[in-house]
Amino acid sequence: MKKSSLFFVCLLSLSAYLQAELRFATVFGNGAVLQRQQPVAVWGWADPAAKVEVAFSGQQLSTNADASGYWKVMLAPMEANASGQKLAARSGSEQVSVDDILVGEVWIVAGQSNMRAGGPDKPNGVNPFYQTPADAANLPAIRVRNNYPNVSLEPLDDIMPEFRKKTDWVTKDDLSGNLPIPYYFARILRDKLQVPVGLLYLAASGTNQAAWMSKETLESFPGKGSFPNFYEQYLAEKEARLGKSKGAIQSWEDFLKAQDEWFESQNGRWPGRGMTYVNYPTALYNGRVHPFAPYGVKGVIWHQGEAGPGGPYDQRLVAMFRQWRELYGQDFYAIWGTLSKHTKSQPPLNPAISGFYRSGTNGHLRRALTLFEGDPKVEYVELYDLGNDDTHFTQKAESGRRMALAALDIAYGQPQTYTGPRIADSKFEGGKVFLKFDHVGEGLVYRPSINGISGFFVQDDQGQSRWANVEVLSKDSIVLSHPDLNNIAYVAGGAASNPHETLLNSDGIPLSTFSLNPGKVRTGKVDQPVELVKFESNPGGKINLHFSHAQQEGYMFELRERRAPKGKTATMKVYVPSEWQGVEVVQQGSALPLEAVVEGENRFLKIEVAVNGGQVTVAEKGKLELFKGIDRY
């Protein structure tokens, strides 16, 4: 046997004890997952100009380090392998290795806190609930490579030495309980593809989009005032804000000095904790995205937007993903989700359109898909119906399910229904508007809301507004009309802070918000004399009303207050539709005492509701069973 072959057969048990320049990039830790079915880059550092030999899974490659010591080889495409193998390298007398390397599917996880905050693994009573089959055995591993703070205003070739203490990928065995979106995403991919799944976890809480973008990309967007580009503008804004702080660190340079001192002493907490430093433009791109390029990946899942920044988010998102692809040298997939709705508001009874601070960002997130100009490797999933105005919404399991189904559909050739109906075509004909949708699954499902409200806002060329009448024409088409409107000029569907959810696909996902002919709409304050739920008396504190679910037969809400004393209640007045033949009100299954109130033509009930006592259901008599098991937020 040749000596070179013998080297790759023997375990390199002494490598950990050798002091040498040779090393792999930090991303290649024990337990790493390599991307299957495509060339895979393996790289690291050695002495300048030194010959480096790399071995993995029967492949033996060699190259020479450049003048800076950087080296890279490309492994030929491999099929999935759930049995751990050794990745080894040597250069002269130096040798290093990492163990338990798998081959499967690798996805980058990026964005802000909703990619890290967890949610329960339980059904919400509305959408299909996914669980790994109980009889599943010997399932491949799910591995996670978490990142470290590592922020920089200059691109880093690798994680800073001070953050390389924990380089192993962690196997996630328990995929139940309270988990963030990516774990639910990975579970479904693992189950459906039957291969190991690796998550390159880059997401960081409270982060803005500009922090994830390269300097050159940000510089391609115009700045305001005297600033030549958006990078210079945003950097100045961050420096100015930091300069007004009361702490000892009042500039990026101050932060770098404090960080160097912390690296030396390791006393106390890293001085960059918090949102200030991670939100400098390019800080996360340079410190989290750039160091791991060109690691082989299938794609990236992204959820971000609450932290902005304002401006052309849609254009920046497209530019960001395209630049990441260029950096990694791979035309990988990109899947992102919309932001959640505002349940402190309620579905309006009078025809109206409304929005809140997330509405604009959601418009950008939806429009970004069209800016990719037919790129088959990008997609968004509608998550508007899953959350509420709490930043960290709880429906992470369903969010991960939708992202995973989108990946199965566009990246793995397994057709799925993963997002709500989207407008595909429209035709205005006087008093009628014909609409066609895609993403309908087995077909559109239309169910009117309270008072028969359709949720489709229409307005004529004179500014008269109505809830449209809806007729389902086929599995993917409807027609809107109203007898009062002879020439409809504007249409909007689901265009409210908390919309009526009336048009769904066969999987129960409501349509993606849309509007047609926005230049034609005449906006103004719409009188809403009647609300479905309102406080009759408020005992003080900061009680939040969350309106969670509405349909023709009833609706649901709850009262929440942080640190509310046990037993605290509030008196509420709830609306009773005129067509209901009797009414029942329960909180967490227990009937509440009712006091009937009539105001003009409207019927109400006074009820006493426990704060933090769970969901209240107001339903037509005999219809409570329709709401059993529904717990959306």
Image (cartoon, helix red, strand yellow):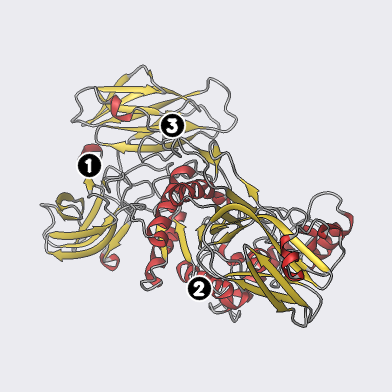
Instruction: Say what amino acid the circle numbered 1 marks.
Output: Arg
Query: Are the residues at dot 2 and dot 1 in contact (C-beta closer than 8 Å)?
Result: no
Of residues 627 and 42, the one drawn nearer to the viewer in this rendering: 42
Instruction: Say what amino acid the circle numbered 3 marks.
Output: Glu
Q: Residues within 10 Å of mark 1 (few under 14, many from 20)?
A: some
Q: Image point 62% across, 46% down: which residue? A: 171
Of residues 274 and 93, the one drawn nearer to the viewer in this rendering: 93
Single out the mark in the foreground, 1 or 3.
1
Of residues 69 and 547, the one drawn nearer to the viewer in this rendering: 69
**Label 3 or label 2, whichever comes before in sequence order:** 2
Q: Which mark is residue 476?
A: none
Residue 19 x, y percent position in the rendering: 87, 64
Q: Secondary structure at mark 1?
A: loop
Q: CA distance from mark 1 to mark 3?
A: 23 Å
Single out the mark in the foreground, 2 or 1.
2
Q: Which residue is mark 1?
A: 447
Residue at the extreme front of the image, as rendered: 1
**Label 2 or label 1, whichever comes before in sequence order:** 2
Single out the mark in the foreground, 3 or 2.
2
Q: Which residue is mark 3?
A: 558
Q: Image point 74% across, 79% down: which residue? A: 65
Q: Which mark is residue 322?
A: 2
Query: Can you say which quadrant of the picture contains the N terminus?
Result: bottom right
Q: CA distance from mark 3 to mark 2?
A: 43 Å
Q: Compared with residue 142, is residue 74 higher up or lower down, i.e. above or below?
A: below
Q: Compared with residue 606, is residue 429 higher up or lower down, i.e. above or below?
A: below
Q: Image point 49% across, 67% down: which residue? A: 332
Residue 562 x, y percent position in the rendering: 57, 33
Q: CA distance from mark 2 to mark 1?
A: 40 Å
